[in-house]
Amino acid sequence: MPRLLARLRPVLAGSLLAAVLVPSAANAQAPAEPTILYGVAYYNEYMPAPLQPGRLEKDVAMMQAAGITVVRMGESTWSLWEPSDGHFDYAWMDRVVDAMGKAGIKVILGTPTYSIPTWMAHAHPEILARPMGGAAVGYGMRQNMDYDNPQFRFYAERIVRNLAEHYKNNPTVIGWQVDNETGSNGATNADVFTGFVEYLKQKYKTTDALNKAWFLNYWGEDVNDWADMPTRDNATSTSYKLEWTRWQQLRVTRYLAFQAALLRKYAAPSQFLTHNYGGIMQSDVDEPAVAKLLDIVGNDPYHRTQDHEDGAWQALQGDYARSLKHRNFFVLETDAQTLGWNSAGQFPPYDGQLRQDVYTHVSSGANMVEYWHWHSIHAGQETYWKGVLSHDLEPNRAYAEVTRVAHELKSIGPQLADMKINNQVAILYSVDSQNGISFMPYEAHESHGWEPGKPTGSYNALVTQLHDAVYFANVGSDFVFPDVSQEELSRYKLLVVPALYVADDALLSKIATYVHNGGHVLMTFKSGFTNENSAVRWERAPGPLREAAGFTYQEFSNLERPLSLKGDPLHAGEQNKVSTWAEFLQLNTAKPLAFYDHPFFGQWPAITTNRYGQGTLTYEGTLLSDTLQRSLVVDELTRAGISGADQHLPEHVQVKHGTGRDGQRLHYYFNYSSAPATFHYTYAPAKDLLTGHSLAADQAVTIAPWDVVIAHETK
């Protein structure tokens, strides 16, 4: 069966994928964690050759003294596992695993399939991923292969099977990371395109159906024979582009399912499966589908530090990761010291921020926090992506802070692990809308590439702005996805809907029903505009949402410059600004909340609210400033009955809540600033787990700069 899986042609679509490649839910139960795992990625093989003798023993001794409990290893060096075709070497890693086991440090092994060895690229250059447009390809970068290629699948199956069999009975190895930060690799190889055509045949059945769904009469691009299907390279059809992104997402899911099936077969049942998303909201990954393959969702939430540290990005990443399986998750990589593929982003955390960051992740539901990585690398692309130890490999400020955290977790970790979080706000995330908007963007902006703690693209920026607004109001949130059930929606008091540009009628009807049944919705511009094929609806906007929204519109405009709202209705002061986009909303039953202060645009409302059934739908027809967005979110939270003492905490103090495995409530208070902050504790009598101090209701509590209080209720 594994050999068969390795050679399956990339023509399987959804139903066959589910039947053949996706493990059943019964095989994917996350193990309960007795405590918070705390560790690092470790690469003894990266150590300078002169230091190799004796360095492993020094590292393990330092980890043991610090209190490190887990390491992740092995995912980056296929070339050592298999130095030549069919010749396998385990001794180099056995030595490390044995040393960790003797020190009581658990190991997660990664399948080393994201970076192919030179011998493979030389023997099979066709494995290298062909980029869009067909530019020349070459070896030298990781994730540079077409993993649908049958030859690659043969090699990948062999290495995964051999590693799983070799370590299945090793008690030190507690789990497997499937591949590493997997995406589509931008592959457009011939086999990828052939698979796409087969996928289209299964979805649309006939070319006539495809032509009608995609409006291919435009420019006479009808496909009247499947053999005539053009490649993605020069496609102008927005429907083609959207379907291609879905195909790439399916490729990712199927590839990870291929590896997961091998590990389920050959690894020990006690060894869990995880995968580290390379940050969430990736345009070419169906993240909910991938989560179904895993026991535990993993994520790599890199973020900004120093004066930019406010916990918001970690909360966004953590809320999303937790929502994928409605379970606690792993942080498999995060900042240790500084980041960067050059030395232009070297911003080491202030004293206390490294420790505070751990509890920030835990407060979102993380059952493990690992740094990338243990020691800084002395050469290569990631020379300046520093680990806990700097290039001198000696104890330092970061090591001291890690040691402090590890010893705290040894004491309080069992009370924090498997914490349950029950939120009343959900944010609807749609990867189709992200991609659809990217094909027809509503704003022009320069892309500066990946930056830690920064969203990519307009849609993700809007999602982040809305999540931040809820977060800074000291309210927790979950994420839901387009396949959310009506029952699941009904659990939330407020549903936040960023720019739902691509959606079928069923999803829009589901949102309208949620409102009618008493739910509250905050929705932004561009919602309901196109159908599931990224084709503009041929009924007046906002289509099936018209009754629930209480307005229609026929026109829209870009805004050359920011506009003010008339009368500063949300008390935003200098930030009483909107920008970029304006929909000319014509009111039916909706009530205006704000108008543009402009001689032309001022005839239309910028923000509306509508009572529909038992609930309300508030709509933003324009892009609000961050300050306006936060003010409106506070109003909507109040309307939904979500408000209290948490909304009156001092600036820079954030609180997050959960329930421990003992059934008692946990309250995490963070001071994200360089000055002490004082607040009033307003919950049941508790003990601060970090200091042992008792906390009484309405007691004044002072938090030191970049510090945290974890109140564990004692009643």
Image (spheres, grey):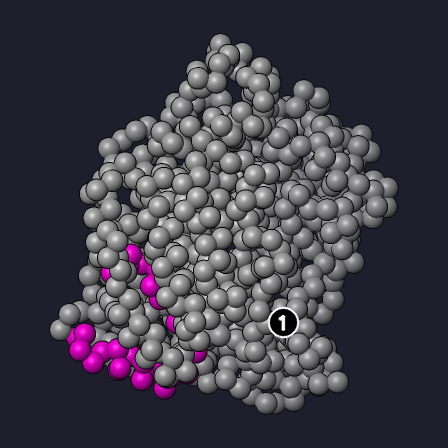
SS majority, magenta: helix
Horizontally, is 236 left or right of 210 in the view? left
| Residue most extreme to the left | 50
Q: Is residue 600 above or below residue 419?
A: above
Task: Give the residue pinned by disc 1.
Answer: 419
The mark total stands at 1
At x 20%, y 48%, the residue is 119
**Quarter of the image where one finds residue 139:** top left
At x 71%, y 31%, the residue is 505
Horizontally, is 469 left or right of 457 in the view? right
Q: On the rendered image, what quadrant is the C terminus found in?
A: bottom right
Image location of residue 496, percent across then percent down: 67, 48
Magenta residues, start to end: 51-80
- Residue 611 is at least partly visible in this image: no
- Residue type for callout 1: Met
The one nearer the camera, 548 or 579, is 548
At x 22%, y 78%, the residue is 55
Sort mark 1 into few (<14), some (14-19) or many (20+) by Cα contacts within 10 Å. many
The one nearer the camera, 86 or 539, is 86
At x 29%, y 69%, the residue is 93
Image location of residue 594, percent across then percent down: 70, 40
Q: Is 389 colored magenta in this rendering?
A: no
Q: Is 75 colored magenta in this rendering?
A: yes
